[in-house]
Image (cartoon, grey):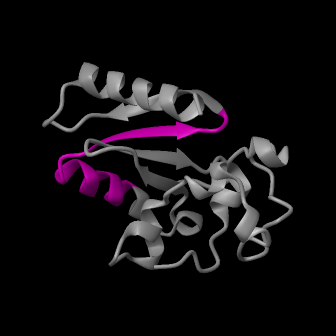
Amino acid sequence: MVCGECTLCCDLFEVKWLNKPVNTKCIHCDLGCKIHDEKPSECTDFDCAYIQSKVTNINLRPDKCGIIFEKLSDNIFYGTVNPNQKPTKYAFAQINNFITQGFSVVLGSIKEPTNKFIISDKHEELVIRNEFAEYLLNRYDK
């Protein structure tokens, strides 16, 4: 699976190494990264769930569904909601699919300070909240 025409992660996410603010097109992005061999760890460490999937509906590609999903752990998928697009029915169906598979889902936005937790019945909410908080500490402690 490849990104295809999707460059949403290059648009939405901050890249401190490049002084690229959130919700701004990366100057190195042109249907692919023009500095691919030298791109910072902020970019290389990101694992889009769409790219990781072996069989995926094109409607789940982040630029089409409005949410970039990434698997954070064996328990959690995180979805960054595109503030410039309303999430589609396919995005909500994917969230339900994750829940059915036993994952909890955390939804966030670059414009909202709080996250929405959708807890699988296989998890305790406090455990998922603590696991997510630990993930954030480790992610930004690099």
- Residue 118 percent location from the top left of the image: 32, 36
Q: Which residue is drawn at 49% across and 30% down?
A: 138
In the rendered image, the residue lying farthest to the left is 122
Q: Residue at x 44, y 52 (%)?
A: 70
Where residue 89 sits, quadrant-wise, is: bottom left
Q: Which residue is drawn at 54% across and 46% down?
A: 80
Q: Which of 129 and 47 is in front in this view?
A: 47
95 part of magenta stretch: yes
Q: Where's the N terminus, which quadrant? A: bottom left
80 part of magenta stretch: no
- Residue 96 percent location from the top left of the image: 27, 52
**For residue 60, above or below residue 5:** above
Q: Residue at x 27, y 53 (%)?
A: 98
| Count of picture labels | 0
Q: In this view, does 140 lie to the left or right of 133?
A: right
Magenta region: 92-111
- Residue 22 percent location from the top left of the image: 75, 43
